[in-house]
Image: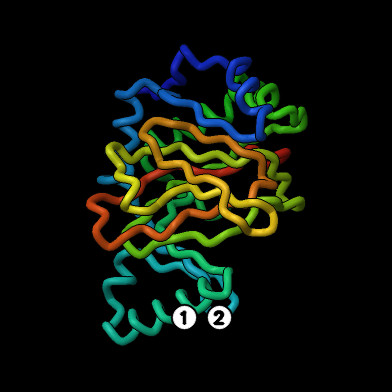
Amino acid sequence: MDIKLNPSFDAALVRQKYQFDNRVRVHSFLDDNDANLLLQTLARETVFASAFNVDGANGSLTDDEMRKLTPAQVDDLQKKIYQHASEGAGFLYGRHDITGRDAAPGPRALREFADILNSKPMIEAVRQISGHDDIGYASAQATRYLPGNFLTRHTDYHPDEGRRVAYVMNLSPEWHPDWGGMLQFYEQEGAPRDAWSPQFNTLTLFDVAHVHAVTFVAPYAKVPRFAITGWFRTKAL
């Protein structure tokens, strides 16, 4: 089965909405059957590693490696992760590289979705939507937020990587807002603006200058928060 862009996608209409605040949500970005295929691929076929920041350095552990830790080691790791988070520089979530340096042959459906984002029509559409004519590539990673996972406040601006527009392809059906996992936006000085729920089969686009976070996922969240995320860039890395 080849994943395809929903033919109802209208770049000109999306551009009108994006221009208001350099961010937009595109509902029903894929056919629902294709979105469900991606969800099942993430839930059943994708190997995730927990990414985090400890002692000033980024680290990751696969699910198997996490299970081998002793309770004391898990407790120590969690304390260090939360300590960094309390200082405004922390994250903990599952990731699976699709297009980057650490990418390995993975599920076909994920590669097909990355190909859609990197197709000439989609790159041209995002150029039109954002006004960034130098966009030429889309990176991609799968993400999984479990209870206790989060991403603190930051921007995605990174001139060395040529990032222009961030995207989040949400793949969590029936996500309850009380579970957390919101895409929270902030003013530059840190005041909260608004939060967007991860609505299923919705592609979120926003300029990398926006201050944002993924809010803490509550212990009572019934399902993981799955998404495919990345940036439309000027170049591949």
Q: Is residue 49 visible?
A: no
**Is 96 above or below relative to 111?**
below
- The picture places residue 31, in percent across and down from the top left corner, at 36, 20
**Is 135 above or below relative to 215?**
above
**Is 154 above or below relative to 1?**
below
Q: Nearer the viewer, residue 110 or 165?
A: 165
- The picture places residue 10, in percent across and down from the top left corner, at 55, 15
Which colouring convention does the figure follow? rainbow
Q: Nearer the viewer, residue 42 or 197?
A: 197
Residue 43 sits in which quadrant?
top left
Q: Quadrant of the N terminus?
A: top left
- The picture places residue 150, in percent across and down from the top left corner, at 44, 60
Q: Amino acid at mark 1?
A: Lys
**Residue at x 36% of width, y 34% of height:** 200
Q: Which residue is mark 1?
A: 80
**Residue at x 41% of width, y 60% of height:** 216
Q: Amino acid at mark 2?
A: Asp
Q: Which mark is residue 55?
A: 2
The earlier-in-sequence mark between 2 and 1 is 2
Q: Nearer the viewer, residue 177 or 105?
A: 177
**Is 2 above or below relative to 48?**
above
Q: Are marks 2 and 1 in contact (CB under 8 Å)?
A: yes
**Residue at x 68% of width, y 27% of height:** 19
Residue farthest to the bottom?
72
Q: Which mark is residue 152?
A: none
Q: Residues within 10 Å of mark 2 (few under 14, many from 20)?
A: few
Residue 128 sits in which quadrant?
top right
Q: CA gap, disc 2 to disc 1?
A: 7 Å
Q: Is residue 207 visible?
A: yes
Judge left or right: residue 23 versus residue 180: right
Q: Circle 2 — which element?
A: loop
